[in-house]
Amino acid sequence: MRTLLKHTDTSKKQTVIALLRHGKTVWNEAKRIQGHKDSPLSENGAKQVHQWGKFLATVSIDRIISSDLSRVKETVAIIQQYIEDVPLEFDSALREQSWGEWEGKTFPELHEGEELAKQVAAGWDFCPPGGESRLEVLQRALPVVENILDRFPGEQILLVCHEGIVKSILYHLAGRKFMPDEKKIIQNRQMHLVYSKNRELTLGPINVFPDFLR
């Protein structure tokens, strides 16, 4: 099987973590904010995850670590049809950012007021009313990654989670400030790699998008 990261020297015990967002959901398609609330995968979302499953069957995956929200569990269940007998763990610390009072609302609804623009301009301190900030998301996500490095050195880990988790980790490693005038670096519905040797976490290839998914 191929490694997830090209030219990886497995003899050096390099740990590879592949970050993958759950498949598109019914609420995603309605542009409705989910946060800790949930909705099932849409038909298109499930089809997309099946394609990812086929791709992941061609690479070496040692284990899966996943958010415990149902849309991610549904995503993982589809992936498991293609990579059987891979150890699986669920971790509530990988849940999506809490959007508090905004959960269940649509983005067009939020654009009617001034609060959304105010929060977007806050960068890492972006915090929906009654929710949590992006910085708080990072502060609960990073210990999960560090725990992976301690427990599973040299393994290739598939981490299935949410956009808020993915961005917090990648933006942290890339030195981003989460400001609206920054150039976008992460494309939607793609896989991103980070890797580590001797517990030093490094940003690997991002926007890994197999040809059959284009």
Image (spheres, rainbow, N blue to C red):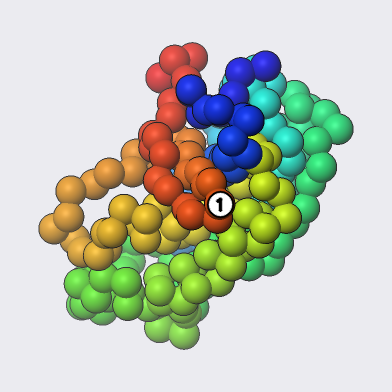
Instruction: Note whether 179 is above or below 47 in the view shown.
Output: below
**Camera-nearest residue between 201 and 141:** 201
Q: Is residue 201 above or below residue 102?
A: above
Q: Is residue 81 above or below residue 214?
A: below
Residue type at the position of mark 1: Asn
Density class for disc 1 (Cα within 10 Å; few <14, some 14-19, many ≥20) is few
Please tell me which residue is depicted at 25% across the width and 65% down the height of the picture.
177
User: Which residue appears at 52% of the width and 47% of the height?
Assistant: 196
Residue 159: image x %, image y %?
Answer: 61, 47
Residue pointed to by mark 1: 198
Q: Nearer the viewer, residue 198 or 69?
A: 198
Helix, strand or loop at disc 1?
Answer: loop
Q: In the figure, residue 74 lies in which quadrant? A: top right
Q: Position of residue 112 (x, y in %)?
A: 24, 70
Q: Position of residue 181 (x, y in %)?
A: 13, 58
Quarter of the image that includes the N terminus = top right
